[in-house]
Image (cartoon, rainbow, N blue to C red):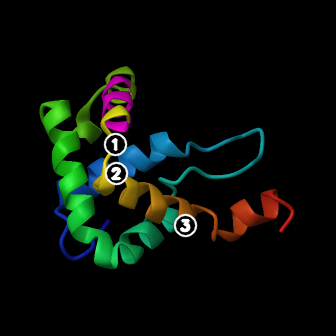
Amino acid sequence: MHPTPGLTETEARDLRALVGLMIPASTTYDVPGADDTLIFADILRSLERDTEDARAALKELAGLSGGAFADLAPDRRCEVSAIFKEQGGAPLFALNRVGLLCYYRDDRVMRSLGQ
């Protein structure tokens, strides 16, 4: 994975782990999670003007994690992401917006919705 300009490899890994928690894969609906290779590549390409907000959010996430979020055990990731979500703010809003936009323009997701 090659991170987008402005994100380090660690930030990109943390972002991928976070969006995978935000929108997990579903076998019930046969859809990938937002951490799917194609969807995540679209997220990285689509950050553009939100790169600084993404970096700020990921820095905050790393602080809550005590290091790389992606390296945490799954249960700890859930705990940290809940705290992160509770704190909210514009940087997290930017990540949510980009993640949702890219997720819902994926053909597999749209087919599952009958579109």
Amino acid, disc 2: Leu
x 25%, y 62%: residue = 53
At 61% across and 44% down in the image, what residue appears? Answer: 25
Q: Which residue is mark 1?
A: 88
Alpha carbons under labels 2 and 3: distance apart: 14 Å
Check disc 3 and report the residue beneath it.
101
Kind of residue at disc 1? Gly
Which badge, 1 or 3, comes first in the chain's sequence? 1
Q: Label 1 near label 2: C-beta < 8 Å?
A: yes
Question: Which label is found at residue 92?
Answer: 2
Sequence-first tag of 2 and 3? 2
Which one is in front, 4 or 50? 50
Whether residue 103 sits left or right of residue 71 in the image: it is right
Residue at left offset 31%, top offset 48%: 89
Is disc 2 in contact with disc 3, using a CB cutoff of under 8 Å? no
Magenta stretch: give its range: 79-85
Residue 109 can be seen, yes or no: yes
User: Residue 81 colored magenta?
Assistant: yes
Residue 98's spot in the image, x, y percent? 45, 65
Residue 22 lies, in percent from the top left, at 49, 43
